[in-house]
Amino acid sequence: MAAPSSDTCEAMERSIRERVPPLLTDLYQFTMAYAYWRTRRHQEPAVFELFFRDNPFGGGFSLFAGLRDCLLFLRTFRYTNEDVEFLRSVLPPATDPAFFQFLRGLDCSGVTLRSVPEGTVVFAREPLMEVAGPLAVVQLLETSLLCLVNYASLVCSNAARFRLAAGPGRKLLEMGLRRAQGPDGGLTASRYTHVGGFDLTSNVQAGFLFGIPVAGTMAHSYVTSFTSLEEVWPQTLVALNGDPDPVDIISLTKGWLSRVCELLGGEPGKIHEGELAAFLSYAIAYPQNFLPVIDSYSVGCSGLLNFCAVALALCELDYRPVGVRLDSGDLCTQSLDVRRVFRLCSEHFSVSAFDSLIIVGTNNITEQSMAELNKKENEIDVVGVGTHLVTCTRQPSLGCVYKLVEVRGKPRMKISEDPEKSTVPGRKAVYRLIDAEGHPFLDLVSLAVESPPEAGVSLSCYPLMMCDNSCVSVIPAQVTCLRQEVFTKGQVTHPLSSAAETRVKVQSSLQTLHPRHKRLQEPDSYTVALSEKLHHLVTEIQKGNSINSNFLLAN
């Protein structure tokens, strides 16, 4: 499918402005910004980091997504007069009127964003984005950036897990729009499930905006709306071979249905006439795209027989039917039965088109049922997934956080009673260390001022998840820097990737990851570690916090 045009790119930017205006944030961002402004600290240079604390779904990795939307948001960030007047009405009456003038002039011209590339495999507790700029501005950005990254990364990671469960050969169709958390959730899900590995979407607007291939067949309501062949209109179809004379397709199909029943031992009395009428009407409308749902009544007694009769009639007129959809029951067993019938018809009636018919399976598919599908013999070519994909049933939030790590060039650290909620101070660099086989084995977080690690040179580091705080030594075969500057001085400084380009990045990044880290159940933990200097800084700040806590007792 073609990439989005300039018109659709403009529509995407308008969409960001409409979906994520600057007021889409928490009230306390404004009260903090006001307090900074009152104490004349609002222009102090500050650095925040965005990260998550645990890999989602009990897995070994996540995928970073949402960066493009963040960049478009930063580029258009500005408060309107209407925004400011509303803030004047909700902030306390004692708020200095000059603060609202300050807000009216704010933009992101002083903000710099450094980030992991979108579509990269990432891990818990490593910084994904670094947002630097005037303290008040970068504070005001917090909620919006978290909103843009949290769900995008979560649903993209969920899609990648479904793809791993399905294997590389089976096509995956996202069809969760009707079950999504609102229109924006549905559109975001369609985009980032495609990025995460799904091939198709049922969401037409997602196809328009993001260039994702769209697909769809028919609902059971279409089938059950017909009761008789008398409702089929028109009742003729012109052959594809150029013969101008219309063919009575109802009579042609009835003839084929008798032959199919004879071949398969079908009972004419159990065949549903309304279903046959629905199939015929759809086939007349779309003779090149005939793919009905065949389980509205009974797959074996009616749906499959009706499909074969209509499909054989289409083949006689030189059209190529596409296949069938199964939406209930034991999909694996039914798919084997359907394929057996297709092959039997192909051989008995000498119709080779039946050899290439596809079978689509949709029936409340979960990650577990997708994995089980791979373990059983089946003939399903395409799997459609909705609810459990877009709602991320197993884990509704990734839990990204946005924490201050530096003010005025001085490192800042949150020291919590819950050690897992403590932060790592200072401006940082992130490096991915790769072994001799080309697999990443450790991500190193170091201070930005440190020299980067070198391939073939031993280094010591402190894994974040080790309870005993012990040091390990490693020798990387290759080193990759994960940080790139993507926004500065109000401008996007790195090319914006399309959904298709980010999708390629995802597959490339996942392919390099060792299988033990990609296991859906009980994966090996991937190591994220601090450099010696960064670990020393953390230790010193923790010690200093203990000393400084006695300041009230000082003379």
Image (cartoon, rainbow, N blue to C red):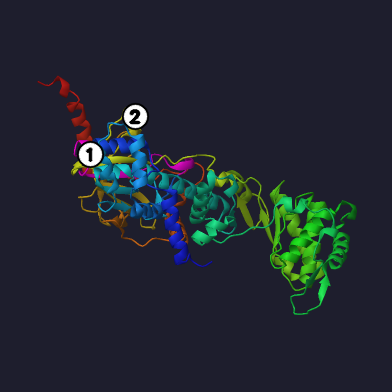
In space, the residues marked 1 and 2 are separated at their CA atoms by 31 Å
Q: Is residue 375 left or right of residue 300?
A: left
Which label belongs to residue 404? none
Q: Is residue 521 visible?
A: yes
Magenta span contains residue 42? yes
Span of residues in magenta: 38-59
Q: Nearer the viewer, residue 32 or 38?
A: 38
Magenta span contains residue 10? no
> Which residue corresponds to mark 2?
418
Amino acid on which the number 1 mark rests in the picture: Trp
Query: Which element type, helix, strand or loop, lies under badge 2?
Result: loop
Q: Residue at x 56, y 61 (%)?
A: 213
The picture places residue 532, in percent across and down from the top left corner, at 23, 43
Task: Confirm or deny contact between disc 1 and disc 2 (CB under 8 A).
Answer: no
Q: Residue at x 29, y 56 (%)?
A: 490
Q: Nearer the viewer, residue 318 or 445?
A: 318
